[in-house]
Image: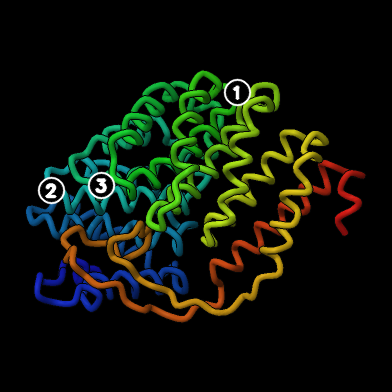
Amino acid sequence: MCPLLTETANEDEDSDLAADRSAAEVIDTMAINLPRHVFGPVLEFASVNFRHVNPKYREAAVTSLGVVSEGCSEHFKDKLEECLKVVLEALKDQEQMVRGAASFALGQFAEHLQPEILSHYESVLPCILNALEDPSDEVKEKSYYALAAFCEDMGEDILPYLEPLICRLVISLQSSPRNLQETCMSAIGSVAAAAEQAFIPYAEKVLEMMKGFMVLTKDEDLCARARATEVVGIVAMAVGRTRMEAILPPFIEAAISGFGLDYSELREYTHGFFSNVAEILDDSFSQYLPHVVPLAFSSCNLDDGSAVDIDDADGVDNGFSGVSSDDDDDDEPRVRNISVRTGVLDEKAAATQAIGFFALHTKSAYAPYP
């Protein structure tokens, strides 16, 4: 099955039906259900081919490791150093398709191989930093995702890398296209969460940048606005009440105004933002209850409905639609399946959690809101 990962679609073929994508999905399913039987052959394939003369085989080698990282997570523990060697070497490959696959695999490792992968931060973080300057936007985007997944739980281990990471991310945020800005903001949030009080010297600059995103109103910009709202909440939690209380009102006002834009993901992230602010301000958050409680109730009362899951080849995708780097950029989005878990359910979950935080931190002031 692994050799099929080398068989990418031609430009005139439907990449959704390409052998490499189908093979990745099958291998992933097998890894989740039969990890003991899958990990050995995949590791052997990767070890044999990660220096293959044909770049498609090098790409397939690192892709295969990323694909099975969720299902075979327990089996990776004893072989993680060996697997990281393959992926980090591929991240420096001269071929973009190989670097793209390596950044995908590293993101999967960062998400599914916690906490074991954190002990390798001294080798992983410098490689991610280099990948953030890759000429390929695809590699950059996947590297932001890998950085976000990797850094969130690093704690004080991130401190030696904090300055170069933030400098690189801020520069990228100022100069990147919108889709990269969204994943870049996720990475900034993870770095802030890990750094906590050490993030204070960078908070003002980051918060000032978030202001610009939190006033965007065009439909195509609302995902970025949602990410910015999330980042402000994370930064506020990191640096604390003393430094945030006086400067929060305009951010809260912008967050409330976002509910008039009819975008579920923005509402979801805004409820998370309000949860963070309630935790920071504690009983001082009472002044905002008349404004935010009705918004939370409104989200809780939404009809779940059902949603058509659209597979957009140009979107941020940490699954298998982005396995190969030479997919046709002109692919049309396709209907993948009808999903019971909709964005509305995520919004309702965030709103419910927010209500709990409001009651917990404002205590008796919440009594008028049964």
The image quadrant of residue 325 is bottom left
In the image, taking residue 108 as reference, residue 270 lies left or right, namely: right
Q: At which x and y percent is residue 90?
A: 22, 45
Of labels 1 and 3, earlier in sequence is 3
Of labels 2 and 1, earlier in sequence is 2
> In the rendered structure, which amino acid carries the disc numbered 3?
Val
The image quadrant of residue 140 is top left
SS assignment at label 1: helix
Tell me what residue is drawn at x 83 percent, y 49 percent: 359
* Residue 78 visible here: no
Task: Specify few, some or many for label 2: CA neighbours under 10 Å numbering under 14, 14-19, or 20 or more.
Answer: some
* Image position of 47 with respect to 342: above or below: above
Q: At which x and y percent is residue 357?
A: 76, 48
Which residue is denoted by mark 2 in the rendering? 95
Marks 2/3: CA–CA distance: 11 Å
In the image, taking residue 155 as reference, residue 98 lies left or right, namely: left
Q: Residue 139 — which label?
A: 3
